[in-house]
Image: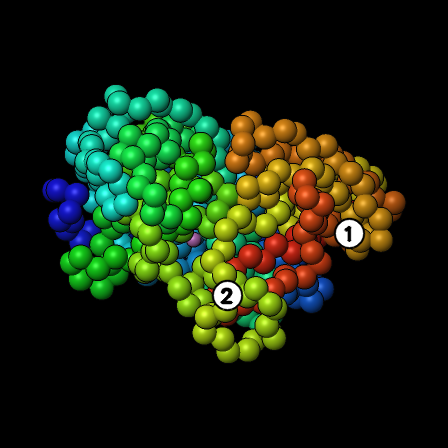
Amino acid sequence: MTQDQHRMPDAHAVVTGRRGAMTGTSLMTLGATMVAAPLVAKLVGESITPAAAQAAAPETLRMQGKAPLVVLGDRPLVAETPETLLDDAVTPAEKMFIRMNGRIPEPVADPGAWRFRVEGELNAPLELSVAELQARFEVVTLQLQMECGGNGRAQFQPQTRGNQWTSGAISNAEWTGVRLRDVLNAAGLKPGAAFTGHVGADPHLSGEAGRLSISRGMPIAKAMDETTLLAFRMNGAAIPNVHGAPLRLIVPGWPGSLSQKWLTKILVRATPHDGAGMGGTSYRVPVRPIVPGSENNGRDFADMTSMPVRSILTNVAHGTRLPAGMREIDLRGAAWAGDDTVSALHVSVDYGASWQAMQVAAPANRHAWQRWTGKARFASDGYFEIWYRATDDKGRMQPHAAANWNPQGYGANAISRVAVLVG
Ligand SMILES: Nc1nc2c(c(=O)[nH]1)N[C@H]1C(S)=C(S)[C@@H](COP(=O)(O)O)O[C@H]1N2
Ligand SMILES: [Mo]
């Protein structure tokens, strides 16, 4: 099998199964009792888990090498990671969310022989194998967050089209590769080099040869950022096939769609790239806010760049029931802010009337997410909601409701809420 001529494996043979309404952690066994209460239904529209927002129980991914992720779509395959599965500082392969736009290609037999090209506005276009990339350029290893541009989409009202992600389209793996910047410098940028365009080898859903499922691009400055990598290893092992082996682009902090999997080519262009997923309302948001639910062709929109600040709570699941008399619970999670860093994480157990500061660790390196820890205190037994809110280093907080409504539902980063019942 060559990289340009994939058979059409049936990615859709992925088996899924129904499961209970809540995510499967040990705490949830107790929590399920409580979630049956109608009050949870009233929370829909906030980011209170997809499970609660759906009448039917979610489908669970059953795929070799993957945890029981929540399946949002199977054609193409899309699965999100419940927040409580994101409790590791470095996201293990099995817990990484999956976003396919086309079909999953067949694994390649010889990863080192995979060919990659840079062409376009360059003095000397290059074609190199993965083995040559590795030998010729400095190899770096970084923890990098990768978040889908549509993460949080389920918060939008009215509902927007696309996969109804809650907060689980995020990963923070440790990627090993070479800097795209070093490769572009070796090829020599011409003065007109202003944008990139990315090409991968996954077959289109239709099966039509040569048709790309997604092909996005970015301004050259982001391509030249020292954390933009051509990655060939993940978490010290081979990249799993579904996550883009043998070679993928990692563009941390910007919409995940830029992080092309099964990467074969990067075009350097004088004008913005015009591939699948560019222009119109694709990965574009209003510059001037529009009326929620209104029609818009996106002509006046701007391409999404850095993702907004967001946080997750990774050790307490929504619907957790705690023993009577319990007055304190340890909390921990992660927070990130695109190209920026997170400067604070606050928790409220009284609907935002008062907030307590948690401890936020420094990122392992630029563009890694940050872990946070702290405690929530309850004045009595009863029903509480833990609200958690991150603030970035520019002072921007997660808002109370998803802002800047747009037809394809990008950039929703409202405060998340997890319900707990004490006693
Ligand atoms: N070749 C290719 N690259 C791709 C995609 C795809 O469908 N094909 N999906 C993109 C999108 S929209 C996202 S959010 C990330 C998801 O990466 P993951 O599935 O490894 O988590 O990959 C991006 N790169
Ligand atoms: Mo995405």
Q: Is residue 36 visible?
A: no
Q: Nearer the viewer, residue 415 or 317?
A: 415
| Residue 116 pos. (x, y %) | 22, 38
| 162 lies left or right of 289 | left
SS type, badge 2: loop
Residue 231: image tag: none
Verify CB contact (< 8 Å) between mark 1 and mark 2: no
Q: Which residue is mark 1?
A: 384
| Residue 139 pos. (x, y %) | 35, 23
Q: Residues within 10 Å of mark 1 (few under 14, many from 20)?
A: many
Q: Which residue is mark 2?
A: 301
Question: Label 2 amino acid?
Answer: Phe
Question: Label 1 amino acid?
Answer: Phe
Q: Residues within 10 Å of mark 2 (few under 14, many from 20)?
A: many
Q: Identify the residue at image location x=50%, y=39%.
A: 145
Tell me if residue 258 comes above or below residue 205 in the rendering: above
| Residue 94 pos. (x, y %) | 41, 38
Q: Nearer the viewer, residue 377 or 21?
A: 377
Q: Identify the residue at image location x=35%, y=30%.
A: 182
Q: Nearer the viewer, residue 359 or 364?
A: 364
Q: Identify the residue at image location x=71%, y=45%.
A: 395
| 412 lies left or right of 124 | right
| 80 lies left or right of 395 | left
SS type, badge 1: strand
Name the image colouring.
rainbow
